[in-house]
Image: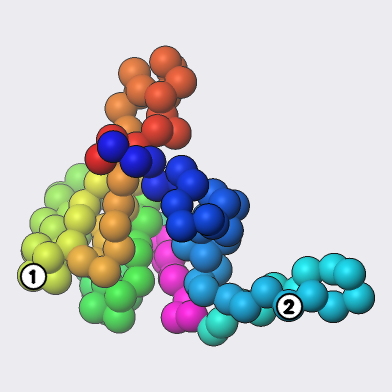
Amino acid sequence: MQSAFEEEEGRSWWSRLRERLFGAGEDEEEDGGTVIRLHARAAHHVNVLYARTMEDAKRAADGLKAGHQQVVNFQYAEGRVRERIIDFLMGVVYALEGTVERVHEQVFLFAPASVQVETTHIDDFHNGSWSERER
């Protein structure tokens, strides 16, 4: 199986990584140096918010509907309100066919379907394989 950054079609892994991060650009030689043109791409937005009320949940839901990831910290929300907000946002994510990941005890990542979320286990981090992707 070929990894994502192995040599292919005469292009270096750096070229493919740069293209993946910044889009397909055109390299030009100018005065002996390389100039990289970056094509305009839609900006990726990540909203980070502390949710305490259902109004905060509505703002997060509107962000999800707009295609933005939401990192929501519930540490200041009261127990019953926290449960209602989480249930509400999980419903929004389900309707959008997105993803929910628990980042920490009271911090969640809510992402729309347009965002690919990759997670690793702590064991993978400790044994050094956290940077390797299984395909």
Residue furthest bottom in the image: 40
The correct choice, above or below, for 58 with respect to 107 in the image is: below
Residue at image x 21%, y 66%? 113
The span picked out in magenta is 41-49
Q: Quadrant of residue 99?
A: bottom left
Residue 124, percent from left and from top:
36, 23
Relative image position of residue 18 (x, y in whole percent): 57, 60
Vertical relation: 63 (above or below) 97: below
Colour treatment of the image? rainbow
Q: Quadrant of residue 47?
A: bottom left
Is disc 1 surrounded by few (<14), some (14 to 19) or many (20+) residues within 10 Å?
few
Depth order, front residue of 11/59: 11
**Depth order, front residue of 31/80:** 31
Residue 1 horizontal/vertical position (percent): 28, 37
- Compared with residue 62, is residue 111 higher up or lower down, i.e. above or below? above
**Disc 1 target residue:** 95
Quarter of the view holding residue 110: bottom left
In this figure, which residue is indicated by the disc labeled 2? 28
Asked whether residue 31 appears in the rendered view, the answer is yes
Judge by depth and name the residue closer to the eye, 74 or 70. 70
